[in-house]
Amino acid sequence: MSIQDLIIFDTSTLPEYYNDVHKILALPKGHVVTYDYSARHISEAAQQILRALVDPKYKVRAVLAYIQPDAYQKGEEVISDETLVSPTFQTLTRLANVIAVRQVNHNGKPRYYIDLELFGYPYDPERTTAGNVVEALRKLDALPRKTYISVYPDTSINALFETKADDTAFSQVVDALSKDSSQFNKDTFWRIYSITARTKSAWPMITVKAKPLVANVGDLGNRKYSYLNVLDQSQISFHIQFCRGKQEQGKDYRIRKITVDSTPKVTSDLLTSSFWSRSFGEETVSITIPATSSLSYQEAVFKIETGSHEKDERKDYPYGPLISVAVRYRKSIRRSLLAIVSVALSSGLFAWAAFSTSTLTSDLIAGYIVPLEYRASAVVIGVLLSLYAFYLWSDDIALDKVRRG
């Protein structure tokens, strides 16, 4: 069966949907987002593809796009669900792969839940491809606000997925969304371009090199979700890139506070718990995963949220990304085994030092006195092994903690 690719539109006419565009721009490649639409907002051809995708053996690509009436602003009333007429503002926003589809009936009406694994950013200079796609779909009466998911109308999707220019493409999307005719004008834009993790070394004062961390995809109930998989006593670093549209160059840039929090409160050791946005440049947010005594997985969700500015007109809209990243962590089996062996050895040394005042023979004659320095050495080595075991098991003695930061 031949499965065609899809195009999925955002219009962001309500505050609860406005963050969707910011979220798909901010999350790194490999993370999963879920879109849901009622069947009446999906073209019949696209519904046939989605029904086929319920079978996981089929895969399809999707281009995410944003469209609005020209000069539409936050909070303006939506008049109808008819197809948007020209002139419209449109831009491609993100590339993705459809990895799962669920059809659920709500009050007898079908609704589709679509799990998308984010890919790169669409390289579309001057938004030429976006304009051509919108005009082709307008002729088919397959645009928002009537239709949000359609079959991608031409073959330009191949070039979008094959072109590797994420840095340039991300900047192009931000330039487009920052235009005066877009409701995202004057928003704060940033993305996580890389995630690295540095685990605790098995040897004190030895620094482990940070390694790239990619998202895993798992099942949460009947849907897919993405998470990071690390060991306890690790440090996760989110590398963030800021970008600002060309039309917003000047002194009127609105600096917003970005905060980092976790649920549940797994750690208070956030090396950067808040920072200020900027026009361009980079920031690194580092989070320390605490020690756990469990060999089974624990899970926490870290949230990075862009605050509002005093000049922002609508306080019910997010003016920048609000994203959540799930993290699964457990005790390191290697470090746990080393800690157990160290405790066993130290216990043996303490016992030997305590009971080896003499060595008795089977004839109950006077034995040989063990030299005092031997017993003292055994106690010292036992103490060091105990401290080493505690270092491996807990972060209370973390000689390399500063180095990991």
Image (cartoon, rainbow, N blue to C red):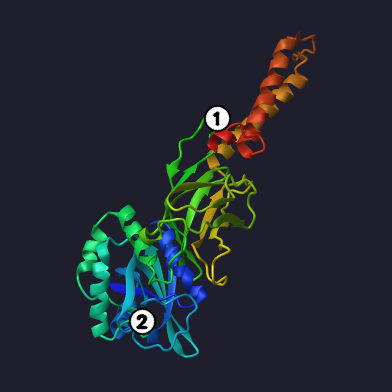
Circle 2: element type? loop
Q: Amino acid at mark 2?
A: Pro
Question: In the displayed structure, would residue 137 be above or below residue 91?
Answer: below
Q: Seen in the image, is 60 located left or right of residue 229?
A: left
For residue 262, the mark is none
Label 2: how many residues lie within 10 Å, few (<14), some (14-19) or many (20+)?
many
Residue at 33 percent of width and 72 percent of height: 90
Residue identifier under label 2:
144
Circle 1: element type? loop
Q: What number of labels is visible?
A: 2
Q: Quadrant of the N terminus?
A: bottom left
Question: In the displayed structure, would residue 324 be above or below residue 389?
Answer: below
Residue identifier under label 1:
203
Label 1: how many residues lie within 10 Å, few (<14), some (14-19) or many (20+)?
some
Q: Can the viewer see residue 272 in this picture?
A: yes
Can you tell which quarter of the image residue 153 is in?
bottom left
Q: Amino acid at mark 1?
A: Trp
